[in-house]
Image: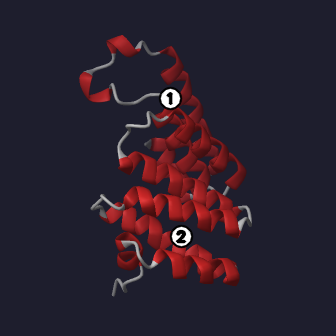
Amino acid sequence: MEARAYARLGDEAACDRALSDASAVFERRSPDDDPEWFRYFDDAELSAEIGHCFRDLRRPQDAAAYASQCLAALDPAASPRSQFFATMVLADAYLGAGEANQACATVLDALRLGEPIRSARCVNYLREFRQSLAASGATSAATDLYERAREFRLWRIAGRSTA
């Protein structure tokens, strides 16, 4: 969480140090000895956290690698919420790398995963993506996405004014 905070603040050096420390501690842990409240934190969760950091630091290739690693490691029965967030990080990474078509296709995957979810945080991820997509100038990809995504509840909510 320290690394996530530094990433959100844009402090790349501090984030990298915190990620290095967290990864070292994670590698030394004994999962059987983890407290009950922490047992959910596995390789997929660590990859998701690192992916979030790199997304916030605007390092799209790194973010995509870790988000993909997370999605590959997630149990297919994993929470749709975890799958949604990792998929959104991947979509953000694609958009950050200038791959608007792939980003939009990935957001549609996230929206499908997000159908059963009621979460302001999910809506915020979509709002941020919508803002980034508008700023990217990817008009044909955006036009197609807006047409296809309007059937999804989270997309519609994310499009509402927050004022």
Residue in view at x 37 percent, y 84 percent: 160
Res. 32 image quadrant: top left
Q: Quadrant of the C terminus?
A: bottom left
Residue 105 lies, with reference to residue 48, above or below; the image says: below
Q: Is residue 120 left or right of residue 50?
A: left
Residue 136 lies, with reference to residue 14, above or below; the image says: below
Name the spot of residue 22 as percent of width and height, x first: 51, 30
Residue in view at x 48 percent, y 59 percent: 110
Q: Quadrant of the N terminus?
A: top left
Q: Amino acid at mark 1?
A: Asp
Mark 1 or mark 2, earlier in chain: 1
Name the spot of residue 150 as percent of width and height, x first: 44, 79
Task: Say which element carries label 2.
Answer: helix
Give the class, few, some or many, for how many residues have Cα within 10 Å of label 2's Cα (few <14, many ≥20): many
Q: Is residue 162 left or right of residue 57?
A: left
Q: Nearer the viewer, residue 13 or 144?
A: 144
Task: Say which element carries label 1.
Answer: helix
Res. 50 image quadrant: top right
Name the spot of residue 144 as percent of width and height, x first: 61, 79
Give the class, few, some or many, for how many residues have Cα within 10 Å of label 1's Cα (few <14, many ≥20): some
| Residue highlighted by disc 1 | 43
Q: Amino acid at mark 2?
A: Phe
Q: Nearer the viewer, residue 155 or 37?
A: 155
| Residue highlighted by disc 2 | 129
Residue in view at x 40 percent, y 72 percent: 152
Name the spot of residue 84 as percent of width and height, x first: 44, 53
Residue 137 visible (yes or no)? no
Q: CA distance from mark 1 to mark 2?
A: 26 Å
